[in-house]
Image (spheres, rainbow, N blue to C red):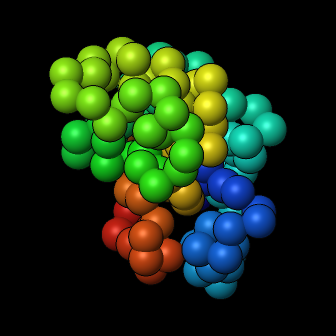
Amino acid sequence: MDDCVLWHNPRCSKSRAALELLRARGIEPRIVEYLRQPPHPAEIERVAQCLGEPVKAMMRTDEPEFAELGLDERGVSDAALFAAMASHPRLIQRPILIRGERAVIGRPPEAVLDLL
């Protein structure tokens, strides 16, 4: 499947498990190590739309930066959330599998199989 992209953190056990599940099915996604190559806010927005969930669903709200940046406050715009994830990619939930116009957060890792 050429059109599968995995936002991947090789240090995350859930991300590694999701990649193993895909490879076990003969799928080699294009891997984006988003901590090394953070996506631009526009790309994060596109993936958020593909997820079909509120923006904060794709964020790691337990990371210290989330509170430090005031992202837990009421009324923070989606644009501010996208910019924060681009500047602080640790805030991006992992892994995220993107296929065409759909995406899924791999928590649990088996959730990535929903896009196959």
Specify whether 116 is left or right of 41. left
- Of 52 and 92, nearer the camera is 92
Tell me what residue is drawn at x 46 percent, y 66 percent.
106
Tell me what residue is drawn at x 55 percent, y 38 percent.
65
The extreme front residue here reads 68
Residue 8 locus on image (x, y percent): 66, 55
Q: Tell me where residue 56 sits by quadrant.
A: top left
Label total for image: 0
Q: Is residue 30 above or below residue 85?
A: below
Specify whether 107 is left or right of 8. left
Q: Is residue 30 above or below residue 111?
A: above
Specify whether 58 is left or right of 10. left
Residue 38 locus on image (x, y percent): 68, 31
Q: Is residue 58 above or below residue 43?
A: below
Query: Which image quarter is the N terminus in?
Result: bottom right
Q: Is residue 57 visible?
A: yes
Tell me what residue is drawn at x 49 percent, y 19 percent.
83
Tell me what residue is drawn at x 76 percent, y 32 percent.
37
Query: Which image quarter is the C terminus in?
Result: bottom left
The extreme bottom residue here reads 24
Q: Tell me where residue 87 sits by quadrant.
A: top right
Q: Is residue 54 above or below residue 96?
A: above
Residue 92 locus on image (x, y percent): 52, 44
Q: Tell me where residue 80 sits by quadrant.
A: top left
Residue 54 locus on image (x, y percent): 23, 40
- Of 83 and 20, nearer the camera is 83
